[in-house]
Amino acid sequence: MARVEASGYHAVVLTVDVQVYGRRERDIVHRFNPREAMAHAPNPRGPDGSYPERLTWDDVAWLKKTTRLPIGIKGIMTARDAKRAVEAGVELIWVSNHGGRQLDHTQGTIDALPSIADAVAGAAPIVIDGGFNRGTAVLKGLALGATVVAAGRAALWGLAADGAAGVACALGILRRELRTTMALCGQTSVKGLSADLISRVD
């Protein structure tokens, strides 16, 4: 943690949404093993890859005592965990189900968000990820209580298509779609977005 602080990082985020690897059928079909792939990655890995299985709230308390940096938790999917995280002094709530790749029948993050936002009640910023690849989706995430919407896959598509220029293009498309969607909703600022703009059709 001292090295992290000395390197100029602004926060530490503990990932808790992948205690064990799920049965990823796509990986099985393609004969890809994430654990083996990470073992050969250029970045150094910790000595014990199974540590996520043993994470508890005590680890959050240890982080709080060990670093002066703000602490976030990535992988919050219930209002109960969000409330407990805030009570433990966590300064960033990250709603994530690991891209839906671990458990096929888990709840979507956008469905979990409203109750989490109610539980947090403005006590900490909320980041959400999980399939946000259109401007309309970003608006929904912000309107339902997220402070930040993470859109990783869209950036990766741009990167694969045209490197850095492709990333800039993909993010530009997202930005334009968001502006258009806001205009069609009669909104001029993301700060004015609220849940009454969203209606669910089952």
Image (tube, rainbow, N blue to C red):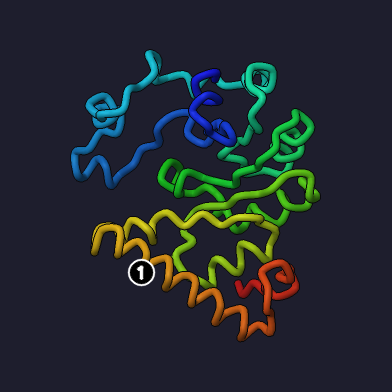
Q: Position of residue 163 (x, y in %)?
A: 26, 58
The three-letter amino acid code for the residue at tag 1 is Cys
Q: Residue furthest top?
A: 47
Relative to the observer, which residue lies in front, 21 or 196?
A: 196
Name the residue located 34 percent from the left edge and 41 percent from the top edge: 24
Relative to the observer, which residue lies in front, 111 or 85?
A: 85
Relative to the observer, which residue lies in front, 175 or 74?
A: 175
Q: Position of residue 72 (x, y in %)?
A: 62, 36
Taking 132 as reference, is 26 above or below it?
above
Q: Quadrant of residue 81?
A: top right
Q: Considering the image in quadrants, where does the C terminus appear? A: bottom right
Residue that label 1 marks: 169
Side of 60 where 178 appears, left or right? left
Taking 170 as reference, is 89 above or below it?
above
Q: Position of residue 60 (x, y in %)?
A: 65, 23
Taking 52 as reference, is 158 above or below it?
below
Name the residue located 69 percent from the left edge and 48 percent from the top edge: 125
Dot 1 falls on a residue whose secondary structure is helix
Name the residue located 58 percent from the left edge and 52 percent from the top edge: 128
Side of 39 where 3 appears, left or right? right
